[in-house]
Amino acid sequence: MSIIEVNNLTKYYGKAKGIVDVSFNVEEGEIFGFIGPNGAGKSTTIRLLLSLIYPSGGTATIFGKDCIKFGPEIRQEIGYLPSEVFYYEGMKVLDLFKYSASFYKKDSTKRLYELAEIMDLDLKRKIDDLSYGNKKKVGIVQGLLHQPRLLMLDEPTSGLDPLMQRKFFDLIKEENKRGATIFFSSHILGEVQRLCSRVAIIKDGSIINIRDIHSLQNDNYKKIRISADGIDVNRFAINGVSNLQRENGTVSFFYKGDINTMTKIISEKEISDVTIEEPTLEEIFMHYYE
């Protein structure tokens, strides 16, 4: 069952493009990555799904219900962490959590205290006394306290130190094991690689690829590095080669094609070293953006 279904979703801000003809689906129980640099359209897509803004065209459903028509009903089962968090600064952390919990029909008191302990939050402190990282932790607890069916996370780890990032990832994995579906937006490829089973890559407001993590990494691309005296970079400029570079007697490039063709070219000249390996997800990502 698809928890999220998006078809040709489009948003213009006046004449400025937000996203255009974005289509994808997220299956129940999936951790789905939504990756792209800042300004690619990630936050716009999430705000449309939450009906915080309205589309210029296309449709989107969550739990099989139209996101615009049934927005308030759908949001009862969603936990949302925006990329930037803002609160009533005069409130204490505990008062904010109780206020947030009051919007849901279930009793979240026990879960509230459990999460606050995990994230090392002082419930008696005022919001305006907190650092940016601690405010982000408040947002994490606020999004998880009602144990939602769907988590919408927009750049969730910004501001968190490495220890808290690890605790956050453990929390997300626990929520997923419980049955929650996770929509995870990020520009940090290592996070996506660590958590997600499938990713959509967005560029300039449009989806350019949707793949599972393993096939994205094993898409027959090889990262090749060759060292030799007097090496001629043009010998490797064949179909399937990209990002061809030369530096200090070493040629490096990506290659997609018959590896036998490439090894034949390499063997035609005496070399001092050769490395053939899988590119990292970061390198694959940058390849799509070139």
Image (cartoon, grey):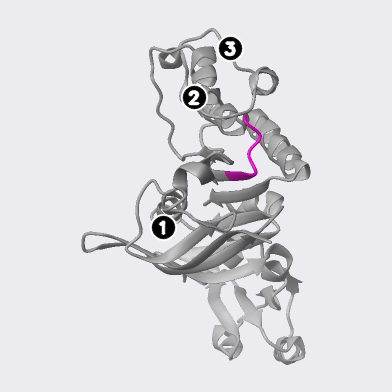
Say above or below: 230 vs 176: below
**Which residue is drawn at the image coordinates 65% and 23% (left, top)?**
107
Secondary structure, mark 3, is loop
Q: CA distance from mark 1 to mark 2?
A: 24 Å
Q: Quadrant of residue 111?
A: top right
* In the image, residue 258 above or below residue 4: below
Name the amino acid, label 2: Lys
State left or right for residue 195 relative to residue 71.
right
Please state, as top left, top right, bottom left or bottom right, where the N terminus lies in the image. Answer: bottom right
Q: Is residue 38 left or right of residue 178?
A: left
Residue for point 35% across, 54% down: 54
Between 286 and 23, the one lying in front of the other is: 23
Q: Amino acid at mark 3?
A: Asp
Q: Which residues are magenta?
A: 146-151
Q: Which structural element holds mark 2? A: helix
What label does residue 41 carry, if any?
1
- Would you say residue 150 sits in the magenta stretch? yes
